[in-house]
Image (spheres, helix red, strand yellow):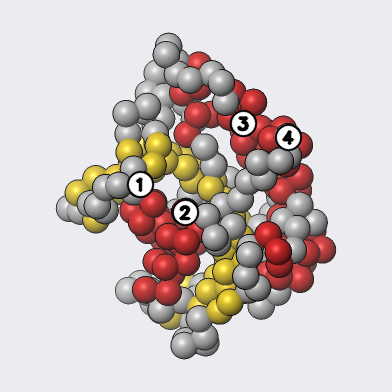
Amino acid sequence: MTSPTANTEDKDATVNTTGSTTPTRLIVFGATGRVGRAVVAGARARGLEVTAVGRADGEVTSAADVARLAAGHDAAVVAVYDAQAAPGEFFPAVARALAAGLPQAGVRRLVSVGLASVLPTADGTPLMDTPGYPQEWREFYVGHGAGTEALRAAAPEALDWAVLSPAGDFDHEGTPRGGYAVAPADAGSRITPAGFAEAVLDEATAPTLHAVHAGIHEEAAS
């Protein structure tokens, strides 16, 4: 993967319509994946200063590497996985490294990309436990959920975090519809990477969700 790259056209914080200052210096871990690429592209389209980080730049399971890479940023987005690692070990290790390293770097906001499988459906049943849901990747689902719980346990008060995932799955062929909503898990729900990136960036720059895992459903703009 490439070394960290940054869009440095705007060094100053932007101000939203309410007059509050929003973060403009964003680091994206996992920037070469589909979701990471969409977040980087969306951030640059908004005029944010973005550092795109890949695996070759450091280990996201290392608090020291996280702190080194994240220094000088306001918010972090994490969209990572390791196909060679046991999910139940990898995702909690990532969470603990972020919880330790980001505050050391002065990063105040974290948005992590999660998995719909562990979210509750409308009746409270986790999506992965609903009839007919694929079970061959259950270890991956459970590992993702363990990562969120590890983050919940390890994150200090100084780190404001949220986990976002599609309410169902990604639509890699569709066209963004221009809007989204927080929704319970639904196996039929779909969202484009670009549409999901808008939700991630909104939460990174103007947080409304705190210490929760939320599903995102794409819908037409109102």
Q: Which residue is mark 3?
A: 140
Q: Residue 34 bears which disc, if any?
A: 2
Count of all numbered marks drawn on residues in the image: 4
> How far apart, in angstroms, are the residues tagged by discs 2 and 3?
18 Å
Residue 130 rendering spot, x and y as whole percentages: 44, 15
Please tell me which residue lies in front, 19 or 209: 209
Tell me the crowding category of disc 3: few under 14, some 14 to 19, or many 20 or more residues within 10 angstroms, Cα based.
Answer: some
Which residue, as the protein is rendered here, is positioned at the far top? 131
Is 44 left or right of 89, judged from the image as shown? left
The amino acid at mark 3 is Phe
**In contact (CB < 8 Å): disc 1 and disc 2:** yes
Q: Which residue is mark 4?
A: 86
Q: Which residue is mark 1?
A: 172
Tell me which corner region of the image, top left, top right, bottom left or bottom right, holds residue 54.
bottom right
Tell me which corner region of the image, top left, top right, bottom left or bottom right, holds residue 102.
bottom right
The amino acid at mark 1 is His
> How far apart, in angstroms, are the residues tagged by discs 3 and 4?
8 Å
Regarding residue 72, the answer to whether it shows in the image is: yes
Query: Considering only vertical position in the picture, is 112 above or below 71?
Result: above
Between disc 2 and disc 3, whose residue precedes? 2
Tell me the crowding category of disc 1: few under 14, some 14 to 19, or many 20 or more residues within 10 angstroms, Cα based.
Answer: few
Residue 89 rendering spot, x and y as whole percentages: 76, 37
Query: Considering only vertical position in the picture, is 45 above or below 154?
Result: below
Between disc 4 and disc 1, whose residue precedes? 4
Tell me the crowding category of disc 4: few under 14, some 14 to 19, or many 20 or more residues within 10 angstroms, Cα based.
Answer: few
Query: Considering only vertical position in the picture, is 158 above or below 113?
Result: below
Regarding residue 108, the answer to whether it shows in the image is: no
The amino acid at mark 4 is Ala
The amino acid at mark 2 is Arg
